[in-house]
Amino acid sequence: MTKTHSPRKPNAALAWRIFFYLLGLLVLALGISMNTKAGLGVSPLISVSYSAADILGRSFANMTLLLYSAYVVVEMILHLLHSKGLACRGNPPKRKLSMALLLDALQFPLSLVFTRFLNLFDIVIPNLASDQVVGFWSTLPGRVLFLLAAICLTGIGAAFSMNMRIIPNPGDGIVQALSDSTGASVGLTKNFMDLGSVALTCVVSLACTRHLIGIGLGTVLCVIGVGRVIAVFNHLCRTKTLTLAGLDPFPKLSAEKGAAAS
């Protein structure tokens, strides 16, 4: 016999969904902040804001807020152009333009909250590459271990926030918008975004300081590791967390069943 699950109360499910989403943002911010403090290179998408903050002597959180705001503006332009292109071809869009633009606009306050988390962690977490940190965590093995912990937290936080399907992080939103506009897969678009971010960071940092800023071993490990952590987390926890949040863990299967029954 198969187990039957009683339907979860809407209020309880919504509370779980919001909790998991906010937890994901908090853990993601912690992972990104730890990544910058290891001093071994940062993930591609934040390398631009990290290098700009270092060159200009500004807050990493505030430069990330500017970068995310730019992403959101680009998303809005892409959604407008994509919607007009579909209309010219007589193809109805998957969702209304007004809804797409609303979700884009909501990324502005999300970015503000998220970068305040970054600011908080930037204050409380020391820079392991500085002279003020002594002992194991200042050594290369300690910093690599710290970096690996940061990658795990980044992947877990990203999985939590993405799976709850509320407001996308601008770093994910820009990839999805580019994918929708070009017809390329999300994975391929993400790879090109990573490469473009790294290339821009290299050019700007070399032009301004004559040495690389934010690019190193950590950059490579983030590209490889974050996706793997998301995959493992989803394999172990996705079904349980989505069920608690009142979301369908298997939307494609449900859609196929609905089509078969109709």
Image: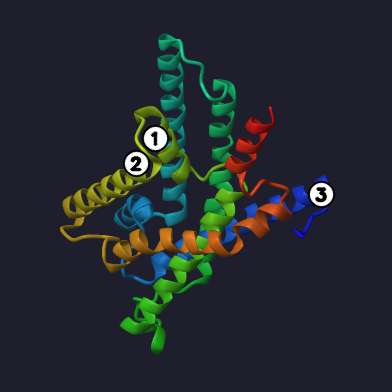
Toward the viewer: 125 or 2? 2
| 10 and 105: which is toward the camera | 10
Q: Position of residue 213 (x, y in %)?
A: 26, 60
Crowd around label 2: few <14 · some 14–19 · many ≥20 (10 Å): many
Position of 198 with respect to 29 (left or right) is left
Q: Residue at x 59, y 26 (%)?
A: 99
Residue 70 is left or right of residue 243, and the answer is left
Mark 2 touches mark 1? (CB < 8 Å): yes
| Residue 204 pos. (x, y %) | 22, 49
Check disc 1 and give the amino acid type: Ser
Residue 221 is situated, as x and y percent measured from the top left of the image, at 33, 66
> Are there few (<14), some (14-19), or many (20+) residues within 10 Å of tag 3?
few
* Residue with the mark numbered 2: 189
Classify mark 3: helix, strand or loop: loop
Farthest bottom residue? 135
Instruction: Please tell me which of labels 2 and 3 falls first in the chain.
Output: 3
Kindly identify which numbered label has been placed on residue 7.
3
Mark 1 sits on what residue? Answer: 179
**Alpha carbon separation for disc pair 3 and 1:** 35 Å
